[in-house]
Image: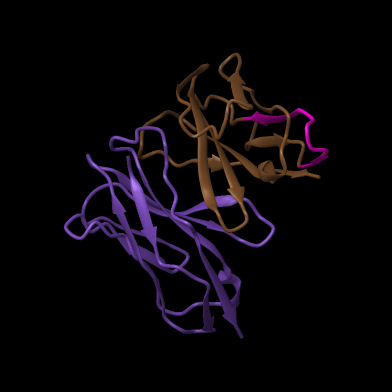
Chain colours: A brown, B purple
Amino acid sequence: GAGVSQSPSNKVTEKGKDVELRCDPISGHTALYWYRQSLGQGLEFLIYFQGNSAPDKSGLPSDRFSAERTGGSVSTLTIQRTQQEDSAVYLCASSPSLDGANVLTFGAGSRLTVL
Amino acid sequence: GDSVTQMEGPVTLSEEAFLTINCTYTATGYPSLFWYVQYPGEGLQLLLKATKADDKGSNKGFEATYRKETTSFHLEKGSVQVSDSAVYFCAPGGGTSYGKLTFGQGTILTVHP
């Protein structure tokens, strides 16, 4: 597609429920990233993919968080047993490759509110 | 891993004032350096970048020079406008944090007429 698409744009859920956030990167972009933006916390790296592989999962906050990417395209970030501290905007970005000089193109984000 | 120290905000200026937002980084290797901007209600987007020492990135009147000797990438604009009100993020990319762009905490800029 022309840009990075994320869905849902807004999600309100109850504590303890599971949520899935979807990212559709720019066509042909092999690198895909997930970040979290919390109020007052800046941008926190979660995970990145090169193709379908995730070389670095170090940013995932706990084992309740997982992510996968299939077909070198769409990625899903899953949060199990959501907690109130998971409330944040989850940002997805893609770039042509993992070359550090590449620009990341971000999606509009998925705002998650856990009640 | 890489890290970034970015000038804390919020920064409030009057229109046509001079802007500097400081950014220093720690990274091994030879990272590229980026400034991203987030306008109110919009997604994060690239403002400018520099890929090697002494390069100057520029866009929309903003400039930043890659200073390897001081590991800095300060953002400047000679005359800010109300429309520049946004959150600005500094980030080194590449180096040993290959693939993991590390962002600063962000600086909120508000420009008053």
Of residues A93 and A65, the one drawn nearer to the viewer in this rendering? A65
**Place of residue B6 in the rendered image (x, y in percent of width and height, measured from the top left):** 40, 61
Q: What segment carries the magenta color?
A: A10-24
Q: Is residue A8 left or right of residue A62?
A: right
Vertical placement of B2 versus B19: above or below? Answer: above
**Place of residue A22 in the rendered image (x, y in percent of width and height, measured from the top left):** 69, 29
Q: Dividing the image into 4 quarters, which one contains the C terminus of chain B?
A: bottom right
- The residue located at (73%, 29%) in the rendering is A81
Of residues B111 and B26, the one drawn nearer to the viewer in this rendering? B26
Decide if residue A108 is in sight here: no
- The residue located at (52%, 82%) in the rendering is B13
**Number of marks in the image?**
0
Vertical placement of B10 versus B56: above or below? Answer: below
**Place of residue B93 in the rendered image (x, y in percent of width and height, measured from the top left):** 36, 42
- Residue furthest top in the image: A71
**Place of residue A17 in the rendered image (x, y in percent of width and height, measured from the top left):** 79, 30
Q: Is residue B75 left or right of residue B109?
A: left
